């Protein structure tokens, strides 16, 4: 069994990425979605080969990337994705914008489901659309799509839904019935669904992640998935994502994108992603999932012990925890006080939409020591 263990703090502080450069060294950074693990050895080897060979040019017109993702999707999600209906681009955000630009006319409305990954609001605007918010429903034990609200928005003229599956920040893997109902609604109203599945490789065993395009014929007709190895394998800086389709009409939309959209894919990102999606990386990914499973449980135990009024539900996927601190009375944006007084950097809840008032998002893709220290630094604020 492969043990995937986060690097020690001293080594992490030598990193120069956003997570490690935004705040001074007395702050524990748990905001941006980067992880603190070493790279999978398969990826290190692929990148080392490329550096040694000076293989740093443009991506080739024929690459193994789409086939490697199709193989990965079949092994990991039992989803038969068609490699001939995919194209790469620099990152998931760019894939979302390029697709939205083609399926929505300027000024048309796009449904987003807050609390949600903050850049979604900007990506819709960048694509020329107008954001229509249909918040997730809190069921008391989890979150789900508000299908009645989505129907109302579609009746009112919304033309697309930007889905996050699994959902950031709640970690919800949307259920197959809700995705199927969403696809039916979109088909009924002639709308498109763009499904951001960047966190899918991090779905915990035992929680049923369903790829949107696997859910039904209706989903394949209306849907686009945008996927990447970048969250699971911490490759965000290398720039590689895939736009995936599963019908002639949607494949034609993606095929119609300018060739430059594909050329923006990073060569290192492509080489690293092919290595990540290869079967040889499965043991590492399984090891990572075990580590993250322990971390999400540890966080729950620590909150129970030190901040019993905090409300936290374990995510189905990923390494992001959505924590409601409103019972503590720390105002709309508790991450500000936590940064100032506890020196722990969390993501601001209200950035995810007004539903995020009183909330924080904590990145537990790190060591048990850092998670423990973070909660122990925050806890005294509740007693002050
Ligand atoms: C749901 C979601 N989509 C997209 C991104 C950004 O991906 P990329 O860097 O590939 O644009 C993130 C990053 O955390 C994310 O959580």
Image (cartoon, helix red, strand yellow):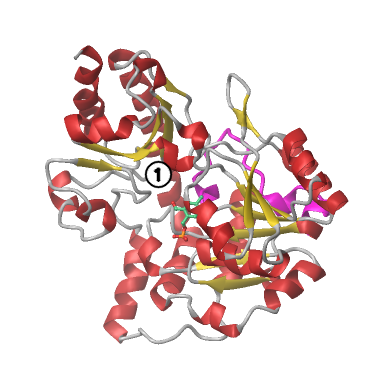
Q: Nearer the viewer, residue 271 or 352?
A: 352
Q: Nearer the viewer, residue 321 or 275?
A: 321
Question: Please, is residue 381 above or below residue 18 in the view?
Answer: above
Q: Quadrant of residue 49?
A: bottom left
Name the residue tied to disc 1: 287
Q: Is there any visible trace of residue 250 in the rendered image?
A: yes
Residue at the image point whose x is 76% and y is 75% from the top: 252
The quadrant the N terminus occupies is top left
Q: Magenta includes 199? A: yes
Percent coordinates x, y for residue 74 in the rendering: 64, 56
Ligand 1 is within 8 Å of the C-beta of the residue at disc 1:
no
Percent coordinates x, y for residue 70 in the rendering: 63, 63
The quadrant the C terminus occupies is top left
Q: Nearer the viewer, residue 95 or 350?
A: 350
Q: Magenta includes 7? A: no
Q: Nearer the viewer, residue 256 or 298?
A: 256
25 sits to left or right of 170? left
26 sits to left or right of 191? left
Residue at the image point whose x is 19% and y is 26% from the top: 377
Residue at the image point whose x is 78% and y is 47% from the top: 154
Percent coordinates x, y for residue 214 in the rendering: 73, 51
Q: How many marks?
A: 1
Q: Look at the image and give the residue range highlighted in magenta.
A: 198-220
Q: Is there any visible trace of residue 170 in the rendered image?
A: no
Residue at the image point whose x is 51% and y is 48% from the top: 199
Label 1 crowd (10 A; few <14 / some 14-19 / many >=20): some
């Amino acid at each position: 069994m492969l043990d995937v263990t986060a690097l020690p703090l001293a080594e992490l502080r030598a990193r120069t990425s956003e997570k490690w450069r935004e705040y001074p060294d007395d702050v524990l950074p748990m905001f941006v979605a980067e992880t603190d693990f070493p790279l999978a050895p398969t990826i290190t080897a692929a990148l080392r080969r490329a550096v040694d060979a000076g293989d740093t040019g443009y991506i080739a017109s024929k690459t193994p990337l789409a086939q490697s993702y199709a193989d990965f999707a079949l092994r990991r999600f039992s989803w038969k994705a068609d490699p001939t209906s995919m194209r790469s681009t620099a990152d998931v955000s760019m894939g979302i914008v390029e697709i939205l630009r083609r399926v929505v006319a300027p000024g048309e409305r796009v449904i987003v489901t807050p609390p949600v990954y903050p850049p979604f609001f900007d990506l819709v605007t960048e694509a020329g659309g107008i954001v229509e918010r249909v918040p997730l429903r809190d069921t008391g034990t989890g979150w789900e799509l508000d299908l009645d609200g989505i129907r109302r928005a579609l009746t009112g003229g919304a033309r697309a839904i930007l889905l996050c599956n699994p959902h950031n920040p709640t970690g919800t893997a949307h259920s197959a019935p809700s995705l199927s109902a969403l696809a039916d609604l979109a088909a009924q109203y002639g709308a498109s669904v763009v499904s951001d599945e960047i966190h899918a490789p991090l779905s915990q065993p035992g929680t049923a992640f369903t790829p949107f395009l696997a859910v039904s014929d209706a989903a394949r007709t209306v849907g686009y998935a945008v996927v990447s190895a970048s969250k699971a394998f911490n490759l965000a800086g290398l720039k590689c994502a895939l736009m995936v389709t599963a019908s002639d009409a949607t494949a034609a939309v993606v095929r119609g994108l300018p060739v430059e959209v594909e050329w923006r894919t990073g060569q290192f990102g492509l080489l690293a992603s092919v290595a990540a999606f290869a079967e040889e990386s499965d043991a590492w990914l399984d090891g990572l999932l075990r580590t993250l499973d322990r971390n999400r449980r540890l966080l729950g135990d620590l909150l129970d012990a030190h901040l019993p009024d905090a409300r936290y539900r374990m995510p189905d996927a990923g390494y992001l925890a959505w924590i409601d601190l409103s019972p503590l009375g720390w105002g709309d944006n508790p991450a500000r006080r936590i940064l100032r007084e506890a020196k722990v950097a969390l993501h601001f809840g209200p950035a995810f939409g007004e539903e995020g008032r009183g909330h924080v998002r904590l990145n537990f893709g790190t060591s048990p020591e850092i998670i423990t220290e973070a909660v122990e630094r925050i806890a005294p604020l509740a007693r002050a």
